Amino acid sequence: MRADRFWKGAARAAFDLAFPRRCPFCGAVIGWLPQCADCKAETDAVLHRPFSLSATEHKLEDLEGAASLFLYKDPARRAILEMKNGGRPWYGRELGYALAMSLFGCTFRVRHGIITLNYEGPRLPYDRVVSVPSSHADRPYDSTARMAAALAEALDLPFEKGALERSRPVKPQTGLPGEVRLANPCFSMRVSCPQRLEGRRILLVDDVITTGATISEAARALLQAGALEVFAVSAAASEIEPPQKQEDKGAG
C-alpha cells in the first residue's frame, strides 16, 4: 500500500505543479503549504468546539458518535457551497486534508514536491472509509467522495468508493426546516458491496451535518449490511437547538 501511495503522490505532485492547489476559503494559490495563512484567523473563528457532536442537538441514531470540523458558517459554508455547486470539486481534497490534520492530528509533509499526510497516533478504531452519496445524481463529480478519499489516504485506510447508494431519487434537503428534514421519507440508502463491509468498522464522511438524519440513515444501511459500527465526520455542522429549548421558546 505504501508503494501505491508513493506513485499516487508522484502523479499528484505533477498535477499540483501544473494546477497549483488553491485555498478552498478564498481561492488563493497555496501550492505546497498546509493551509492558507491569510484565512487562518477567519477559519479558526468558525471551528466547531468541541469537535464532537451532541446527540441532544443532532440525530445520531445507529452511530457510535460524530464529529465536525467547522460550524456551517462563512467561510466554511462558502467553501462547501463552492465545492458542491460552484464547479470546484477539487476543494474536496483540501477539506479532506483539513479533516485529517485537525480532527486526527495528521502531519503535513512535502518531500521532492510530493505531499503526504501521515497519521502517527494510536491505532484507529476504523478499518474502512465510506462517503455519503450525493443527492444530485446528475452531477459528473462527487465532491464528498473526493473529501473522503483524501482523508482515507491520510489515515492509510481503504476508501470504499460508491459503497453507499441512494436507493431511490432524493429531494434536495437544502433550505428545508429541521423538522421537515427529520421527517422527510425520501432518505433511503443501500450498500452496493455488503461483502466488503461485513464485520468492518466504518468511518463515514459527509460534507455537512444538519439535523443528522442523513448520516443516521447511512449508518443504518451500513449496519444492516453487516458493518460492526459507524462513526461519522463532516467538514461542517449546523447549530441545532435541543428539542427542549425549542419547546421552551414555543411556550414563551
Image (cartoon, rainbow, N blue to C red):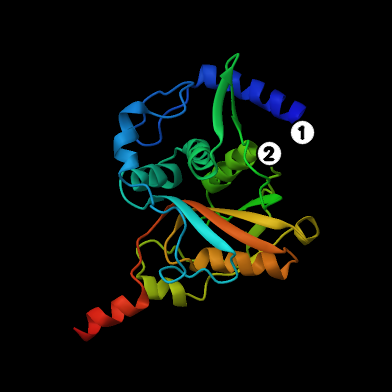
Position of residue 224 measured from the top left corner of the image (x, y, whole percent): 71, 70
Mark 1: amino acid: Met
Q: Classify the position of the C terminus by image quarter.
A: bottom left
In which image quadrant can residue 62 be found? Answer: bottom right
In which image quadrant can residue 43 be found? Answer: top left
Label 1 secondary element: loop
Most extreme residue toward the bottom is: 251
Most extreme residue toward the front is: 122
In the image, is residue 248 above or below residue 154?
below
Mark 2: amino acid: Asp
The residue positioned 36% from the left and 77% from the top of the image is 243
Q: Which residue is mark 2?
A: 156
Position of residue 38 measured from the top left corner of the image (x, y, whole percent): 31, 28
Most extreme residue toward the right is: 195
Alpha-carbon distance for marks 1 and 2?
8 Å
Q: Tell me if 151 is positioned left or right of 125 in this view.
A: left
